[in-house]
Image (cartoon, rainbow, N blue to C red):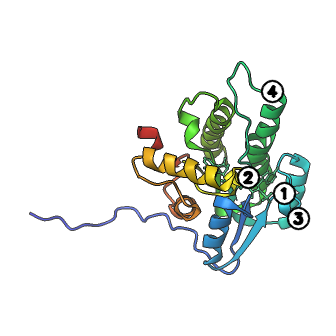
Amino acid sequence: MTAALSSSTSSSPVAAFTPDTVSVVIGGSSGIGRAVAQALGQRPGRVVVAGLSTGLDVADADAVRAFFDELGPVDHVVVTAGSQAPGGAVTAVDLDAAKAAFDVKFWGAIAVAQAAAPHLRPGGTLTLTSGFLARRTVPGAFVKTAMNAALEVSAKLLARELAPLRVNVVSPGLTDTEAYAGLAPEAREAMLAKAAASLPAGRVGQPSDLAAGYLFAIDNAFMTGAVIDLDGGALIQ
Ligand SMILES: NC(=O)c1ccc[n+]([C@@H]2O[C@H](COP(=O)([O-])OP(=O)(O)OC[C@H]3O[C@@H](n4cnc5c(N)ncnc54)[C@H](OP(=O)(O)O)[C@@H]3O)[C@@H](O)[C@H]2O)c1
């Protein structure tokens, strides 16, 4: 016996991208954020990129609020700003450096959420960025672990507070971006090769791999409060 497949409820429409759609990528001038901005740029609408190099410091909450107040209505906000954090054990980390990293990546994302929320149009989304260390304990990576874990739980709270707007998090694994530009070329290649060999996926991430995750979060009208792991299997090692 066969049953006709029918939908008893109409599916929630994904807010279509139109020439009026406004997307904002905070941290979109390099690395993962730039790939997200490029992918969004293939769609109708306007993509606004902001970051230190455009004069917006997310650690300055007043500046973030002024930025969104000036921008007006927005549809999709992505935050990828702030890839640097000091290493060190909990008992030994440089507290000033740790707080400065939190000011950018953690408090910066919260400042963006607060400033963007009143301007997000119905159907809008906010997508934050954590990192696989949020749920792995690696000696010396305390600050990244703490910041990313705090971001993931904050995004879940935001998803409830801002509903029916949708809030999600993309959690990258090791991804080949400008974040590692400080390493000498050979050291960077060696680090990436070693990481690739150790990962179940057999490779590190490319910014375009990650951009696909942000677009998934933006497009899927049933996804909110979620953490999307794009880490080559780092969490199952
Ligand atoms: N790459 C990885 O392996 C990896 C792994 C796990 C998690 N992540 C996370 O993924 C996100 C993106 O990383 P990425 O590798 O793409 O890094 P990236 O290439 O270094 O890009 C970071 C971006 O943050 C912006 N930024 C830094 N400080 C800022 C500030 N105070 N105010 C505003 N913008 C600021 C930079 O803007 P300007 O260029 O304009 O200065 C840049 O566009 C970060 O949250 C990072 O922690 C990355």
Q: Residue at label 4?
A: 95
The amino acid type of the residue labelled 4 equals Leu
Q: Is residue 12 left or right of residue 48?
A: left
Mark 1 Cβ and ligand 1 under 8 Å apart:
yes
The amino acid type of the residue labelled 1 equals Leu
User: Mark 2 or mark 3: which is in front?
Assistant: 2
Mark 4 Cβ and ligand 1 under 8 Å apart:
no
Asked whether the residues under the numbered discs 2 and 1 touch, taking CB atoms below 8 Å apart as contact, a structural biologist would say yes
- Tell me where residue 10 appears, x and y as whole percent: 42, 65
- Tell me where residue 237 appears, x and y as whole percent: 41, 38
Q: Earlier in the sequence, mark 2 or mark 1?
A: 1
Residue 9 seen anywhere in this rendered image of the structure: yes
- Tell me where residue 114 appears, x and y as whole percent: 78, 48
Q: Residue at label 3?
A: 70
Mark 3 Cβ and ligand 1 under 8 Å apart:
no
Residue 52: mark in rendering: 1
Q: Is residue 186 left or right of residue 72?
A: left
* Marks 4 and 3, how far apart at CA: 34 Å
The N terminus is located in which quarter? bottom left
* Marks 4 and 2, how far apart at CA: 21 Å
The amino acid type of the residue labelled 3 equals Glu
User: In which quarter of the view is residue 96 placed?
Assistant: top right
Q: Earlier in the sequence, mark 4 or mark 3?
A: 3
* Marks 4 and 1, how far apart at CA: 23 Å
User: Above or below — where is 111 with respect to 20?
Assistant: above
* Marks 1 and 3, how far apart at CA: 17 Å
* Marks 2 and 1, how far apart at CA: 9 Å
The kind of secondary structure element at disc 1 is: helix
